[in-house]
Amino acid sequence: MYNKNIVLNILSNIFGEQIEDYVQNCVIRLENNILEKYFNTEVDFAWMSTLNQMVVENYNIDLANNEEIISGNLKVQAQIDGFVLEEKEGGFRYKDSVMLPLTLLYEFHVKNQEYRDLYLEYLG
């Protein structure tokens, strides 16, 4: 009944906005040393401009309380913009844009073709 493409379609179509919001929050919380690794320069802050690609790496199906629990890992590619703090001007200056790969743990519940209770966790 399920395969990676079907799970990806469910994640994209039903939970797409939640996933984008979660990835944006992950990007905002990235520390400078992590950002500098991807930008190869000093970056103080990053913002996701687009979520470019999602790939279901794997999925598992468990049954509990007459519902399916689908979980696994999701690989995400996000285009992020990096900024540096301008001390003199008191604002941020655009530095560069890069692709950031992220791996997320996902889990959602299915009962009677109703998809709900998405859980996401940033793995790296």
Image: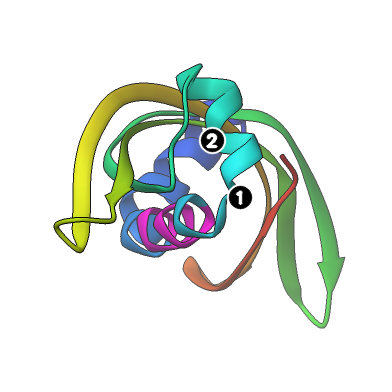
State the image coordinates of residue 66 (x, y, percent, origin top left).
77, 78
The residue labelled by disc 1 is: 31
Q: How is the image coloured?
A: rainbow
Q: How many marks?
A: 2
Indicate the secondary structure of the residue bearing disc 1. Answer: loop
Q: Is residue 91 left or right of residue 107?
A: left
Q: Is residue 119 left or right of residue 61?
A: left
Q: Residue 61 got which mark?
A: none
Q: Residue at the front extreme?
A: 88
Three-letter code for the amino acid on which mark 2 is drawn:
Leu
Instruction: Identify the residue at image location x=14%, y=57%.
Output: 89
Q: Nearer the viewer, residue 124 or 94?
A: 94
From the viewer's perspective, tell me whether residue 72 is left or right of residue 42.
Answer: right
Which residue is farthest top?
40
Q: Are marks 2 and 1 in contact (CB under 8 Å)?
A: yes
Question: Quick one: which residue is furthest to the left in this view?
Answer: 89
Q: Judge whether 29 appears above or below 51 on screen.
A: below
Q: Which residues are magenta?
A: 19-26
Can the viewer see residue 2?
A: no
